[in-house]
């Protein structure tokens, strides 16, 4: 056990505080707009906090740490792209300004506004499926982090993660977006302090000169240049640009923050400033991974990179960073860092639970009811449907998340599962907003071609991730253009 | 390689510096945002 009593006290204090403030949010929920988009009243600073907290989880630290360990400084390229693209979206208002003006609650809702109810339901199913599968790997990896750093016996992993999921579920189900935003604020402050602390510790312990020489020795030029690195190259960089452009505009949990702000102008400013946070969100944990490579990268070579060896035990590259933290952080600091990582875990999971269950309820269950000729539901009934959907998503995550392990680098697995629906959704949203001729046939063709373009090359043909991602976006674009040109736009 | 190293070092400084600075500003000013937001939600609920 690596935890001292002071560490346990800090973690317990955090858990009590976060659940208490989360439950307090319930009394502000008076309508479905409060429950899903915080009454559309979020200001700039709390908007930044909730957007950043939603997209920074322990899973983010883990996959970025692994990426840094495997690819050195070259791994910084996608982090840089994610931040720069977000700043671009914020400055120009590309997609987000028009979506915010439509007063939507979910991304697939746009498909009914612009295309048809049928396409909204198809998109809702694909978005929920891809999103939940994407989130499905979170729990186990987050649990690994906590057990490695705290030293809890791995036999208790399932129990620990079940308790954490139940706590998140409790306030998310009751208070919806209101509770999520309040807890996000607290969690953002804590996870940011932990991020800064770990960065200082990692560089201090590994030493900047040692870090640079280790990457030079192990990877040579490929450890610095994303163009020379055989895993990346120009195709990868273009795919990452498209992927982050679609993530920052059409990813349900991000879009819900855009929809929750006071105005389109506020959403643009939130996006711009969060873009700077995104630079650190990627690069800092990647740096921790490189520091772990420097300190523990002494095992047998695998794919040109040595496996981490800690206390005589060979680990997977993804576990190198938490093992390093268990060794370099002292009592008290370790408690703050684990509380910060728990905060990160809970902010992401609660937001994602709400995001995907909102799609299931608003874009699948309710439109299907209407298509069957049933009457529209009132606000209270819609909240109830959302709460039930939340429970089902949680149950699925508990069973899938704790037993499934993705192959290869987790960052790339998450990118590909996201691309399954993002390629089509992004092309349809951009086409719908900026191209008058796009129509329902084009929309269906884009969604199906985008999904096929991600699934077939990656899972069947086993192509490289960057070629797969590129193919998905290309096919989705072809689908929209060809489908729309084949049939005149519906009146 | 040296050019890439200089580039990534500069980016790391920008990323770390802006991360810390924005955290500080958001922590202080976010509390005021939260208070205003609670007041608005309370008014909306009271109005039905």
Image (cartoon, coloured by chain):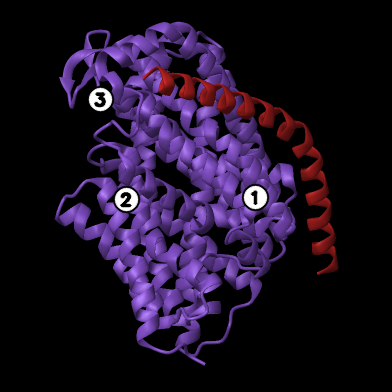
Chain colours: A purple, B red
The percent coordinates of residue A438 (x first, y second) are: 46, 78
Marks 2 and 3 share the same chain: yes
Residue at the spot 19% in from the left edge and 54% down from the top edge: A459
Q: For label 3, count other residues whose C-alpha is less than 10 Å away and answer few (under 14), some (14-19) or many (20+).
A: few
Mark 2 and 1 residues: CB-CB less than 8 Å, in contact?
A: no
**Left or right position of A306 against A119:** left
**Which of label 2 and label 1 is nearer to you?**
1
Residue at the spot 67% in from the left edge and 52% down from the top edge: A268
Label 3 marks a residue whose chain is A
Note whether A277 is above or below A151 in the view shown. Answer: below
Label 2 marks a residue whose chain is A
Q: Is residue A399 visible?
A: no
Residue at the spot 71% in from the left edge and 43% down from the top edge: A46
As drawn, the residue found furthest toward the bottom would be: A491
User: Which residue bears the numbered disc 1?
Assistant: A91
Going from N to C along the chain, the mark reached first, 3 or 1, is 1
User: Which residue bears the numbered disc 2?
Assistant: A416
Going from N to C along the chain, the mark reached first, 2 or 1, is 1
The percent coordinates of residue A304 (x first, y second) are: 19, 23
Q: For label 1, count other residues whose C-alpha is less than 10 Å away and answer few (under 14), some (14-19) or many (20+).
A: some
The answer to which image quadrant residue A104 occupies is bottom right
Q: Is residue A344 visible?
A: yes
User: Which residue bears the numbered disc 3?
Assistant: A316
The percent coordinates of residue A301 (x first, y second) are: 17, 19
Which quadrant of the rendered structure holds the N terminus of chain A? top left
């Amino acid at each position: 056990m690596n935890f001292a009593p002071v560490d346990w006290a800090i973690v317990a204090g955090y858990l009590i505080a976060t659940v208490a403030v989360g439950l307090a949010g319930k009394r502000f929920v008076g309508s479905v707009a409060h429950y899903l988009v915080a009454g559309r009243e979020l200001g700039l600073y709390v908007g930044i906090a909730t957007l950043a907290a939603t997209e920074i989880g322990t899973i983010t630290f883990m996959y970025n740490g692994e990426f840094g360990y495997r690819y050195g400084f070259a791994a910084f390229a996608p982090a840089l792209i994610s931040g720069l693209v977000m700043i671009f979206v914020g400055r120009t208002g590309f997609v987000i300004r028009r979506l915010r003006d439509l007063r939507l609650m979910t991304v697939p809702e746009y498909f009914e506004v612009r295309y048809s109810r049928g396409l909204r339901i198809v998109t809702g199913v694909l978005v929920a499926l891809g999103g939940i599968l994407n989130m499905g790997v979170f729990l186990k990896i987050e649990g690994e982090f906590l057990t490695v750093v705290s030293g809890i016996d791995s036999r208790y992993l399932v129990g620990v993660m079940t308790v954490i999921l139940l706590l998140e579920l409790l306030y998310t189900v009751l208070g919806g977006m209101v509770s999520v935003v309040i807890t996000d604020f607290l969690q953002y402050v804590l996870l940011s302090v932990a991020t800064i602390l770990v960065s200082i510790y990692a560089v201090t312990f590994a030493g900047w000169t040692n870090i640079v020489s280790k990457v030079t020795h192990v990877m040579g030029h490929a450890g610095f240049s994303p163009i020379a690195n055989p895993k990346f190259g120009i195709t990868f960089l273009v795919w990452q640009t498209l992927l982050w452009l679609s993530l920052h505009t059409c990813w349900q949990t991000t879009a819900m923050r855009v929809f929750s702000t006071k105005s389109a102008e506020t959403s643009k400013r939130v996006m711009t400033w969060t873009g700077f946070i995104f630079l650190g969100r990627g690069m800092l944990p990647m740096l921790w991974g490189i520091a772990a490579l420097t300190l523990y990268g002494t095992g047998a070579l695998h794919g040109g990179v040595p496996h981490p060896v800690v206390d005589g035990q060979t680990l997977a590259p993804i576990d190198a960073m938490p093992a390093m933290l268990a060794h370099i952080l002292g009592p008290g600091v370790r408690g703050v860092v684990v509380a910060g990582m728990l905060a990160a875990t809970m902010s992401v999971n609660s937001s994602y639970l709400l995001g995907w269950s909102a799609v299931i309820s608003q874009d699948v269950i309710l439109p299907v009811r209407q298509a069957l000729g049933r009457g529209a539901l009132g606000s209270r009934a819609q909240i109830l449907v959302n709460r039930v959907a939340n429970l089902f998503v949680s149950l699925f995550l508990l069973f899938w998340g704790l037993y499934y392990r993705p192959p290869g680098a987790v960052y790339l697995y998450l990118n590909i599962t996201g691309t399954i629906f993002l390629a089509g959704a992004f092309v349809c949203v951009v086409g719908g907003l900026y191209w008058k001729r796009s129509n329902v046939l084009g929309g269906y063709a884009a969604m199906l071609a985008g999904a096929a373009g991600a699934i077939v090359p990656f899972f069947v043909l086993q192509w490289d991730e960057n070629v797969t991602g590129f193919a998905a976006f290309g096919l989705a674009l072809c689908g929209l253009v060809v489908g729309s040109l084949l049939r005149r736009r519906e009146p | 390689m040296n050019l890439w190293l200089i580039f990534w070092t500069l980016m790391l400084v920008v990323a770390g510096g802006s991360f810390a600075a924005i955290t500080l500003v958001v922590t202080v000013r976010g509390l005021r945002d939260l208070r205003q937001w609670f007041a608005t939600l309370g008014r909306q609920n009271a109005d039905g």
